[in-house]
Amino acid sequence: MYVAPTRMWSPVPLRNIILEILMKHRGVMIDTDLFDNIVRYYSDLSFNEFNKELMRLEIDGLLYVSPITKTKRKVEIIKPGQNYMGVSED
């Protein structure tokens, strides 16, 4: 008996959707608002998977994620020529 998979893959990578949504919002969003927008494309996406992809994008130098409060973070696209210093680079 064949059982259909519960999770379908999307033809568009998650990182592309994150960047596209951010560009539509002038490059800056709160992480929870961004996640709510992404769930429209990836209905079964967990917040943990979302955070892992944000970290990958930040390591690749495409995004910068900074804390606003204990539970809110600002996610912004790094524009060409824009740099952020690491913790030990003051």
Image: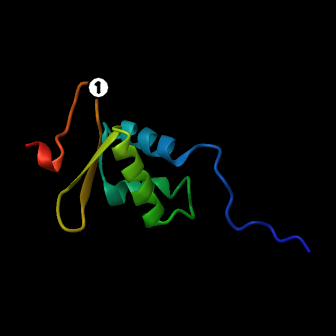
Residue 23 at x, y percent in the picture? 38, 36
Furthest toward the left, the residue is 90
Residue 67 at x, y percent in the picture? 20, 57
Q: Is residue 41 left or right of 61 when viewed as pictured?
A: right
Q: Residue at x 53, y 55 (%)?
A: 40
Q: Quadrant of the N terminus?
A: bottom right
Towards the viewer: 78 or 40: 78
Q: Residue at x 19, y 68 (%)?
A: 70
Q: Is residue 44 left or right of 58 when viewed as pictured?
A: right
Furthest toward the front, the residue is 88
Residue 16 at x, y percent in the picture? 50, 40
Q: How many marks?
A: 1
Q: Looking at the picture, does residue 90 appear above or below residue 83?
A: below
Furthest toward the bottom, the residue is 1
Residue 53 at x, y percent in the picture? 44, 52
**How many other residues sit within 10 Å of disc 1, few (<14), some (14-19) or many (≥20)?**
few
Q: Looking at the picture, does residue 83 appear above or below residue 28?
A: above
Furthest toward the right, the residue is 1
Q: Is residue 79 left or right of 52 when viewed as pictured?
A: left
Q: Residue at x 45, y 39 (%)?
A: 20
Q: Residue at x 19, y 39 (%)?
A: 84
Give the labeled residue for mark 1. Answer: 80
Q: How is the image coloured?
A: rainbow
Towards the viewer: 49 or 74: 49
Q: Amino acid type of disc 1?
A: Pro
Displayed quadrant of residue 77: top left
SS under mark 1: loop
Q: Quadrant of the C terminus?
A: top left
